[in-house]
Image: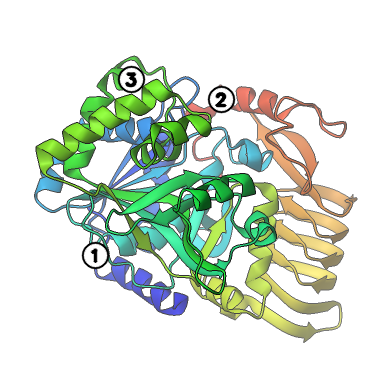
């Protein structure tokens, strides 16, 4: 169960059982920050033994998870001999954080174009100052449990997704590639599929031959898989499938083949390739099927030649296996504003997920079910290092002073406001000398440029910030893209802006 997993996370740090080397793939200008920050919080989020290597993905347009992984490993290998480490049974983890963080705008701008530095509700001390756990630190902390049983392998994780498995973290396949997933048994129906499965990659077990990987299928695609015999419901109409989590581990032999196969792309740094559609899918699909999914048949032929050569030279039959993390696995994706707000408020729930979340972030001592004083009424909320007067319900307030309030389903982080009435809102690093006016679902943040110049940015939890990237919303003086370009010029000199 997740409770047990959290205990093992703490033990991995305490017993020095995490990864030997972690590689942080950062956006341009952010590697200095992570060198400093992770060194400062080392014993809180990763073992003492772990060597931290921060590299920047200086790749125009982005490399994608496949090429980005190979490129990061190659750059880190210039600092320490990772091949030798892995041959001796060492362990390596790569954390992908590069990119603009468009879906989290404008919060990523508040952190100086550093999306993985966005804060989560666990109090931390850094260089004597009060701060909060960062998104990347939460991911690093939660994934150290995978190291112990993956000697000689490279694990790859996204930097904005926290995973708390409900099953053992031990490796369960001898295949060169191990893809992490959450396996469940469910009724196969259009409604169920659209609601809970359509937005994810899926892992389909293939008897005696590992798994098939397919990316974000609609119901029409599901029916095609049934016709091909890949999906076979039982007599109750139930089927067993796993959601792909986008995380995986690879052994050194297969990884070296990949480095050789894509050496030209790594040299010229021009192409963008992802693991799902450009590796797992062509490895596990027919040419016809790959074409039907809108992919390139010539590229499929290239991957098949690569596959055949690897199998012949290594004697390997099954390349891709699966690691089932368990049907009750907790998976928090903090990749966009709505998910960030929603997943934080889940910490207030009287559920397995809520209780596990409070344990993970060490929040039980701050959780207030009911409290009433002369000037403050609190119900089902979390307050850390914060002051307020009025009424707070189903809300999270961190490191903030907010005067007279009436709040419900609010998340307020590192803010100082004289007064505030709001429902279903998100405030992040706000400084306001008077009462702040907000509307339901509003997101408000202050971005500090240069020598203290403050730019207030607003949006809604209902909007898609990626689609708004180049748009100057009516309430904002600049677009998110304009803010990003301005901050990029300051990044080298301001990497400690937010502790």
Residue 389's x, y, as percent? Answer: 84, 70
Q: What residue is at 25 percent from the left and 60 percent from the top?
A: 173
Number of residues whose C-alpha sits closer than 10 Å to that of mark 1, classed few (under 14), some (14–19) or many (20 or more): some
Separation (CA) of disc 1 from disc 3: 37 Å
Residue 136's x, y, as percent? Answer: 47, 50
Number of residues whose C-alpha sits closer than 10 Å to that of mark 3, classed few (under 14), some (14–19) or many (20 or more): some
Q: What residue is at 33 percent from the left and 20 percent from the top?
A: 265
Is 55 or 332 nearer to us in this picture?
332
What residue did someone put label 3 on? 265
What residue did someone put label 2 on? 488
At numbered mark 1, what does the secondary structure look like: helix, strand or loop?
Answer: loop
At numbered mark 2, what does the secondary structure look like: helix, strand or loop?
Answer: helix
Q: How is the image coloured?
A: rainbow
Is 21 or 464 nearer to us in this picture?
464
Is label 1 in contact with label 3 (beta carbons under 8 Å)?
Answer: no
Label disc, if present, on residue 16 of the rendered structure: 1
């Amino acid at each position: 169960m997740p409770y047990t997993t959290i205990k093992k996370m703490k033990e991995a740090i305490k017993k020095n059982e995490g990864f030997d080397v972690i590689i942080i793939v950062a956006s341009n200008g952010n590697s200095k920050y992570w060198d400093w920050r992770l060194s400062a919080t080392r014993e809180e989020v990763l073992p003492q033994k772990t060597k931290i290597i921060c590299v920047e993905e200086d790749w125009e347009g982005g490399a994608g998870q496949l090429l980005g992984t190979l490129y990061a490993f190659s750059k880190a290998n210039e600092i320490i001999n990772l091949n030798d480490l892995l041959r001796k049974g060492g362990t390596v983890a790569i954390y992908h954080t590069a990119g603009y963080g468009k879906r989290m705008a404008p919060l990523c701008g508040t952190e100086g174009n550093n999306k993985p530095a966005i804060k989560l509700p666990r109090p931390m001390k850094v260089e004597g100052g009060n701060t909060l756990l960062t998104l990347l630190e939460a991911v690093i902390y939660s994934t150290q449990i995978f190291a112990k049983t993956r000697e000689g392998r490279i694990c790859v994780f996204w930097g904005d997704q926290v995973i708390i498995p409900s099953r053992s973290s031990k490796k369960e396949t001898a295949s060169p590639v191990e893809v992490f997933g959450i396996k469940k048994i469910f009724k196969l129906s259009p409604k169920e599929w659209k609601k809970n499965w359509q937005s994810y990659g899926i892992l389909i077990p293939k008897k005696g031959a590992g798994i098939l990987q397919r990316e974000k299928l609609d119901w029409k695609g599901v029916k095609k898989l049934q016709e091909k015999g890949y999906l076979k419901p039982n007599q109750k109409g139930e089927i067993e499938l796993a959601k792909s989590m986008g995380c995986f581990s690879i052994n050194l032999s297969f990884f070296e083949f990949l480095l050789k196969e894509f050496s030209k792309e790594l040299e010229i740094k021009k192409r963008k390739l992802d693991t799902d559609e450009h590796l797992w899918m062509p490895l596990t699909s027919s040419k016809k099927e790959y074409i039907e999914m809108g992919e390139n048949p010539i590229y499929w032929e290239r991957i098949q030649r690569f596959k055949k050569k690897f199998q012949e030279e290594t004697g390997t039959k099954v390349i891709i296996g699966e690691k089932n993390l368990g049907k009750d696995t907790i998976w928090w994706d903090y990749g966009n504003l709505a998910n960030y707000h929603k997943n934080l408020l889940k910490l207030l729930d009287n559920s397995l997920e809520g209780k596990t979340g409070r344990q993970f972030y060490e929040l039980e001592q701050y959780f207030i079910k009911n409290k009433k004083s002369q000037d403050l009424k609190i119900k089902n909320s979390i307050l850390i290092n914060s002051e307020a007067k009025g009424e707070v319900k189903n809300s999270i307030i961190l490191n903030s002073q907010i005067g007279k309030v009436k709040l419900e389903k609010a998340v307020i982080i590192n803010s100082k406001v004289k007064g505030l009435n709001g429902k279903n809102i998100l405030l992040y690093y706000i400084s306001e000398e008077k009462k702040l006016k907000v509307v339901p679902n509003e997101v408000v943040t202050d971005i500090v440029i240069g020598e203290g110049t403050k730019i207030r940015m607003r949006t809604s939890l209902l909007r898609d910030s990626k689609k708004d990237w180049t748009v100057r919303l009516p309430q904002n003086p600049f677009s998110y893209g304009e803010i990003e370009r301005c901050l990029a010029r300051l990044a080298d000199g301001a990497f400690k802006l937010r502790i």
